[in-house]
Image (tube, rainbow, N blue to C red):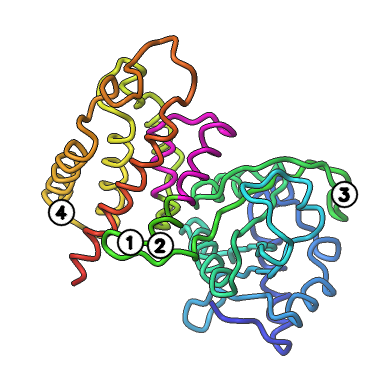
Amino acid sequence: MQLVRTSDFETAKKAYLGVIENTPQIEKHARWVYGKHPTDEMLKTYIERDEMYFLMDGDKIAGAVVISMSQGDDYKAIEWQDDLENDQVATVHLLAICPGYQGRSLGIRILEEAEEIAGRNGKKALRLDALKTNIPARRMYEKAGFSYKGEQRLYAENTGMTDFLFYERSIFTDVQTGPTGSGRDTELMKEYIDKRVHKLYWDEDLNCARTTLICLSELFKVPLEEQVLSSAIGLHGAGKYGAQCGLVEGSLMFIGILYQSMEKTENDIVEACYDFAKQFEEEFGSLRCCRLRPTGFSKNDPPHMCEQLTGKAVLFSYEYINGSLQEENG
């Protein structure tokens, strides 16, 4: 993305006016009104702080966004994944796709680049908020791998008192891993995964298959469609039947998604899934839920009793996939 300079103010203003005037139902969803939100002063401030970027298509502006290297105090009221200081967080504002470029998933691309910029600046998380009425934006954030964290009723010039939803995506920059990981790197990775698994289990009450999918998608920065996560709802041992474990199912699904995005052949994906299943079975003794659970399988078992096993399995899956990619790249 291209940093917006002070001399680009009129260009930025024109871009946002074009979005407001030509985006269908913007008055229903984002509810932007130029002069209230955004304003001239707002754009000038962001530009002077070197926080505004254009997404370019040659010499044309395809989109714009603000990436602030801190969060406002109103963000502190939300129960985030990690309790971070304001300056440990980057926040996204005024994400806009210009008319003619909408419907091409460029919003997700901007969010991915925003994460890279935040990561280079040492930030631990990328956070943002959206009006509760802005359903298209909320869907895009979830598709891009952001997790819903809470809701607040706040005042804005363009809306008055209204409900805002808050989202977060962790920025994983602390660990540099090789094909299998080693030493301190592996310890940091394990600590990160265990913390993430705990949050997904106990705060969001997800099953092992969806937890595995989300962890791997975040670690490899591969966005997941909401439909994919929905398809894994019953994959924890085939709806608690005790069949193939959701830790296996989630990993196999992710391998297919990742390899397809890399334009691998179907045969490549099948072979990778076979090899993964073989190595998983060698490592953990079985692929079946009823044999992997700490005390077998019973409908009366307490929730999330596989938490420790899940952390180990996600780490195993991460290292297997990362190792395969490293080996392939030489």
For the point 76% across and 82% down, the residue is 48
Asked whether disc 3 touches disc 1, contact meaning CB atoms under 8 Å apart, the reply is no
**Crowding at label 3, few (<14), some or many (≥20) Cα neighbours within 10 Å?**
few
- Name the residue that disc number 4 marks: 265
Asked whether disc 1 touches disc 2, contact meaning CB atoms under 8 Å apart, the reply is yes
Asked whether disc 3 touches disc 2, contact meaning CB atoms under 8 Å apart, the reply is no
Above/below status of 313 relative to 181: above
Q: CA distance from mark 4 to mark 1?
A: 31 Å
Label 3 secondary element: strand
Q: Position of residue 154 (x, y in %)?
A: 84, 46
For the point 31% across and 21% down, the residue is 238
* Amino acid under disc 4: Thr
Q: CA distance from mark 3 to mark 1?
A: 49 Å
Label 1 secondary element: loop
- Name the residue that disc number 1 marks: 182
4 or 1: tag closer to the N-terminus: 1
4 or 3: tag closer to the N-terminus: 3
3 or 2: tag closer to the N-terminus: 3
Asked whether disc 4 touches disc 1, contact meaning CB atoms under 8 Å apart, the reply is no
- Name the residue that disc number 2 marks: 185
Q: Position of residue 229 (x, y in %)?
A: 42, 36
Highlighted magenta segment, given as a residue range: 191-216
Q: CA distance from mark 4 to mark 2?
A: 32 Å
- Name the residue that disc number 3 marks: 155
Q: On the rendered structure, is 80 left or right of 197?
A: right
Which one is closest to the eye, mark 3 or mark 1?
Answer: 1
* Amino acid under disc 2: Asp
Q: Residue furthest bottom?
A: 7
| Residue 150, quarter of the rendered image | top right
